[in-house]
Amino acid sequence: MASQKEEIVFAPLGGLGEIGMNAALYGFGTAKKRKWILVDCGVAFAHSDMPGVDLILPDLSFIEKNRADLLGLVVTHAHEDHVGAIAALWPRLGCPVYATRFAAGLLATRRLAEPGAPKVPIHEVAQGGRLNLGPFEIEFVPMSHSIPESNLLAIRTKAGTVVHSGDWKLDPTPGLGKPTDAARLQQIGDEGVRALICDSTNILREGESPSEAQVAEVLREKILAARGRVLVTTFASNVARLRAVCLAAEAAGRRVVLAGRAMERSLAVARECGYLEDVPELLSLESFSRLPANKIVVLATGSQGESRAAMSRIVRGEHPIKLSPNDLVIFSSRTIPGNEREVNAIVNGLILQGVDVLNDRDALIHCSGHPRRGEVAQLYKWLRPQVAVPAHGEALHLRVHAEFARQAGVEHVLVAHNGDMVALGPDTPTHLDQIAHGRLYHDGELILSEKDECFRERHRLAAAGIVSIAFALTAKGDVAGVPDVTMFGLPRKTRDNRPMDEVVDRALFETLDSLPRARKRDADAACAAIERAVRAAVAGVWGKKPHVHVLAIEV
């Protein structure tokens, strides 16, 4: 029998067991009568083994069915893995969205400015502010991160306070925006914290993450020492880093040229929010060719090797920015796992052109926005939660974080993954049901289930190609005209140097000649026989079975 006691539950739909695609549900009430809030709704980025897929989105079907009880979507911060799916999936929810000014501005100028984007009602909440949604009181606590206005959420209910950390670090000198509000976190801990759902990204690393101020100083040194052009590529949303580069360029007597719309949007929103009052106006691409090499710094998108971003186009020679030998390119970023091949291709292309390349292995020109073990330990000391649920990490991160929490003295530690519904309080925390979850693929203009047959078909086509055959049959079962044969993705020659199309033609005509007239009058039967024969013939000389499509037209 379902419990009739009011309780608070946590149900992640993304971000647990993976890094990215963050989406977390919190519910309060009895088992049959819960109200919900959704915290974040982000994307993951497709890899090269997902042909045609642009972005990966969380499957929200569970809360779609319960949308009448969904009180709002609360945004912790504006990174794409936390907000990138809102424009695509909000029409399925129809709820108010709550975010700080910077997050709201970046949403409005990026995803919600795309053609056909929905008109999403976004309500601004100040850092340090509070929001009441039904049984939930939500406090936005400032946290340092690699984007302005990142927030921890203190979610208060009659069953206790649950803290959702969001993305954070303990950086007393973040370079821009508010640092982590240590005093407020200690006060929340003194009030009593039922559960902490906490970032696990850097739980494998000891110590504390370096500060943005340290990175800014090293960038300043490198730019002051440079003789030729300097190009810095970093995450477009890291406004503190962009600001640091601009101030370093000013100190070196250089002007900054922007290359990339994503950076333009981030900086425009940051300026509107008052974060760049000490930064001179930046120059457009048209200014690049007019400035001497020693008077220019370029800020460029594409630090992750994105094919359409500025860095890839610069290396391919398809961009107005042209680099010369002994110019300096600084990768002020880390390579996200899965992007290594694309980033290495850019680095190698630059080196072949004689350009000097500096990355985070060479100097402290990047720091993470996530906490290492020392910082996580400090958060646990401040909050002293009764329950810990590791989040924002792959399976290894979650397991290591769980053991870390136990060693920190947390009484109840639960490891959850996407689709797990966990009761956090007021009673002993426990796993409840599995709820609908999964991935959706943004494929062109469509949003499709990861189980859609088209994705399996693309993998098969990519591995073995396709043979397409069309021919005409008369009512008597005779072939009219010459069959049309087209091959895609097959080798053109066999091992003994025979043309592959001869192998296909021979299998086709031998099958047609051997079929009894009665079977040839049955177009479906004729097509099936040809399909089997051509696939077997190609497999015999190639060792792979292509997809064979046969069309018979009756004339």
Image: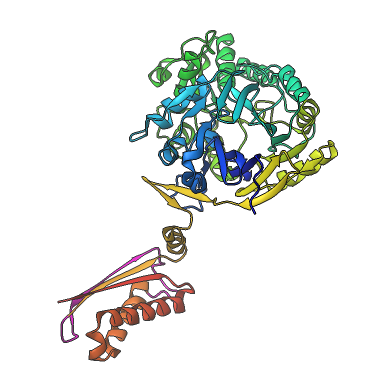
Picture residue at 40% right of the left edge, 66% below the top: 490
Residue 286 picture location, percent across and down = 38, 19
486 magenta-colored? yes
Residue 288 picture location, percent across and down = 43, 19
Picture residue at 65% right of the left edge, 23% below the top: 143
Is residue 374 left or right of 48 when viewed as pictured? Answer: right
- Comparing 437 with 490, the one in front is 437
Residue 499 picture location, percent across and down = 36, 73
Count of labels in the image: 0
The image shows residue 89, relative to residue 459, as above or below, that is: above
Q: Based on the displayed image, in which of its 4 quarters is residue 508 positioned? A: bottom left
Q: Based on the displayed image, in which of its 4 quarters is residue 16 positioned? A: top right
Viewport quadrant of the C terminus: bottom left
Is residue 317 left or right of 383 when viewed as pictured? Answer: left
Picture residue at 43% right of the left edge, 73% below the top: 494
Q: Which residues are magenta?
A: 474-498
Is residue 301 left or right of 14 when viewed as pictured? Answer: left
Q: How is the image coloured?
A: rainbow
- Comparing 42 with 385, the one in front is 385
Viewport quadrant of the N terminus: bottom right
Q: Based on the displayed image, in which of its 4 quarters is residue 422 positioned? A: top right
- Comparing 508 with 31, the one in front is 31
| Residue 263 visible somewhere in the drawing | no
Residue 307 picture location, percent across and down = 46, 40
The image shows residue 439, relative to residue 132, as above or below, that is: below
Magenta-colored segment: predominant secondary structure: loop
296 magenta-colored? no
